[in-house]
């Protein structure tokens, strides 16, 4: 038995100065994206080179409210505001902005410029794609395996498929196609996650995970019930309320003198169908007929009640850091990722201010780990080997059991006299607490922790490249601009 008394999971840290005070940060594709405090200028820094030099800078069409990067397709997607209206835009070929006075094209989704404008030599230019929506966008997420885009609105979720359109022998461009609308009744998501057909939704105190799977043939009775008009179902509910009032009872929604707190609730697998959240699919893409046999399967539902004993007020008790995390085994990783195959394991992580939860979703849905934080957290990021969280003045690192779950799925009989795997029920532990002043933001896959002081610079702590015994996926953390990379732990 080896006892580890102390561990420093970061190899090194570097600082990169930004010309203006940063407002938002995002990482992906080996680059750090910094949105200036004004919200209309985006700067990209290269994290793989010493000193993290500036790649390019470009202006957005509005004030950026939210920013995401997709490794597949290497595009940026933003939620922007201009003239009190909210827009969804995608920025493709942004690396061409490294050259000065490079052309920028603006077009609507699906409207590709053809003909004489693209004859001759291909034009190297950044494109801004306007993505129209029926409702203002609230949140968004990119699938790490396919590059597809999920947008959350007040009453619906919209899925856009990433396409590569060939315009000529020398030129192909990225585009999106709206393929699916999921209508939600009674839910307005504050955060969404999307990966390999799994869709996770989060409100202040509830989490729902569903998966799009081929529809199973239902019984005639079930089909007959499904064809009942919505107004009939509503009238039935009204009649029941009327009967309760007639008998001297008042329905819950009529009790205005009481404030009702929801109770803690956990529904796994088929039980999650009884959560009361209705999802109706509307296929809109060119392949809608072939995909029409898909249906949402409820995987997980979790509801929390405000806890007065957690050291947080009711207003502060809300979920954050929703994340879907796929994991592949060494045998299938390269082939599966390149072909868009199914991951070995899928995990979902979400967190309250004082507690984090990680569930395994494939095969058997179960709670793998619960993280008790020593103080209130603002954000958390899950990776294959570590969980990173930030508090007001610290960056903390915890162990995770993702690898153990994947190893046992890949080889259920892994425990032999020659080799063994830690049980997934083994307690997690904190590895390191790194102190900083005023941590504000943490992002993935390069974790960026932005500090409140000094006012006009950002530091990125980029790791050096040690030669560890065990290989760990690079994860960086920027604190006022510092980025960190996990270092292997041996004992």
Image (cartoon, rainbow, N blue to C red):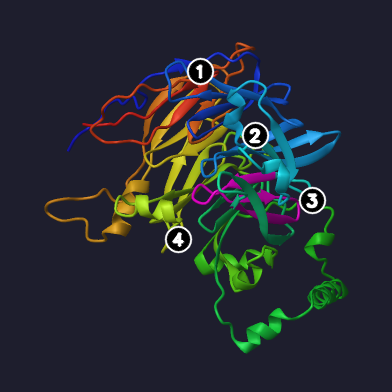
**Alpha carbon distance from label 3 to label 2:** 27 Å
Look at the image and give the residue range highlighted in magenta: 139-163
Residue under numbered circle 1: 53
- Label number found at residue 99: none
Is tag 4's residue or tag 3's residue first in the polypeptide sequence? 3
Q: Nearer the viewer, mark 3 or mark 2?
A: 2
**Alpha carbon distance from label 1 to label 3:** 39 Å
**Alpha carbon distance from label 2 to label 4:** 43 Å
Dot 3, crowdedness within 10 Å: few (<14), some or many (≥20)? some
Pick whichever, 250 or 144, lies toward us.
144
Labels 2 and 4 touching (C-beta < 8 A): no
Q: Measured along the vertical axis of the image, is residue 261 above or below residue 389?
A: below
Give the residue drawn at x 81%, y 75%. 240
The C terminus: image quadrant: top left
- Label number found at residue 135: 3
**Alpha carbon distance from label 1 to label 2:** 20 Å
Is tag 3's residue or tag 2's residue first in the polypeptide sequence? 2
Q: Nearer the viewer, mark 1 or mark 4?
A: 1
Q: Nearer the viewer, mark 4 or mark 3?
A: 3
Is tag 1's residue or tag 3's residue first in the polypeptide sequence? 1
Give the residue drawn at x 46%, y 51%. 347
Residue 169 lies in the magenta-colored region: no
Residue 52 appears in the figure: yes
Quadrant for residue 14, please give it.
top left
Labels 1 and 2 touching (C-beta < 8 A): no
SS for callout 3: loop
Is tag 2's residue or tag 4's residue first in the polypeptide sequence? 2
Residue under numbered circle 2: 126
The N terminus: image quadrant: top left
Labels 4 and 3 touching (C-beta < 8 A): no
């Amino acid at each position: 038995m080896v006892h580890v008394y102390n561990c420093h999971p970061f190899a090194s840290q570097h600082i990169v100065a930004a010309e203006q005070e940063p407002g938002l940060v995002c990482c992906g594709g080996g680059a750090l994206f910094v949105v200036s405090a004004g919200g209309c200028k985006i700067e990209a820094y290269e994290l793989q080179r010493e000193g993290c030099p500036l790649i390019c800078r470009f202006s957005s069409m509005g004030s950026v409210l939210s920013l995401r990067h997709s490794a597949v397709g290497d595009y940026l997607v933003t939620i922007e505001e201009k003239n009190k209206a909210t827009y969804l835009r995608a920025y493709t070929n942004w690396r061409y902005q490294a050259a000065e006075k490079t052309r920028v094209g603006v077009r609507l989704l699906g409207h590709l410029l053809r003909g004489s404008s693209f004859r001759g030599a291909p034009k190297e230019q950044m494109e801004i794609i306007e993505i129209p929506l029926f409702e203002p966008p609230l949140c968004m997420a990119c699938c790490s395996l396919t590059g597809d885009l999920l947008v959350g609105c007040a009453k619906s979720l919209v899925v856009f498929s990433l396409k590569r359109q060939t315009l000529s022998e020398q030129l192909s461009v990225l585009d999106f196609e709206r393929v699916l609308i999921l209508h939600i009744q009674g839910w307005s998501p504050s955060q969404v996650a999307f990966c390999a057909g799994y869709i996770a939704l989060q409100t202040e105190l509830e989490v729902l995970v569903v998966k799009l799977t081929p529809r199973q043939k239902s019984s005639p009775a079930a089909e007959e019930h499904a064809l009942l008009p919505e107004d009939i179902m509503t009238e039935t509910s009204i009649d029941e309320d009327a009967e309760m009032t007639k008998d001297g009872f008042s329905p819950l929604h009529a009790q205005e003198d009481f404030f009702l707190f929801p109770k803690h609730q956990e529904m796994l697998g088929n039980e999650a169908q009884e959560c009361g959240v209705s999802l109706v699919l509307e296929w809109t893409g060119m392949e809608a007929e072939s995909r029409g046999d898909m249906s949402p399967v409820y995987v997980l539902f979790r509801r929390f009640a405000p806890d007065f004993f957690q050291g947080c007020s009711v207003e502060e008790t809300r979920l954050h850091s929703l994340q879907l995390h796929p994991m592949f085994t060494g045998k299938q990783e390269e082939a599966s990722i390149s072909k868009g195959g199914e991951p070995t394991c899928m995990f979902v992580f979400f967190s309250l201010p004082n507690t984090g939860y990680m569930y395994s979703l494939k095969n058997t849905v179960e709670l793998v780990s619960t993280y008790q934080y020593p103080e209130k957290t603002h954000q958390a990021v899950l990776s294959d080997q570590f969980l990173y969280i930030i508090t007001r003045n610290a960056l903390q690192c915890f162990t995770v059991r993702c690898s153990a779950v994947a190893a046992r799925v890949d080889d259920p009989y892994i425990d032999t006299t020659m080799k063994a795997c830690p049980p997934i029920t083994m307690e997690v532990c904190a590895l390191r607490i790194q102190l900083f002043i005023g941590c504000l933001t943490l992002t993935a896959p390069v974790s960026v922790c932005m500090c409140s002081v000094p006012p006009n610079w950002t530091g990125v702590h980029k790791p050096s490249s040690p030669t560890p015994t065990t290989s760990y996926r690079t994860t960086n953390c920027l604190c006022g601009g510092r980025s960190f990379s996990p270092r292997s732990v041996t004992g």
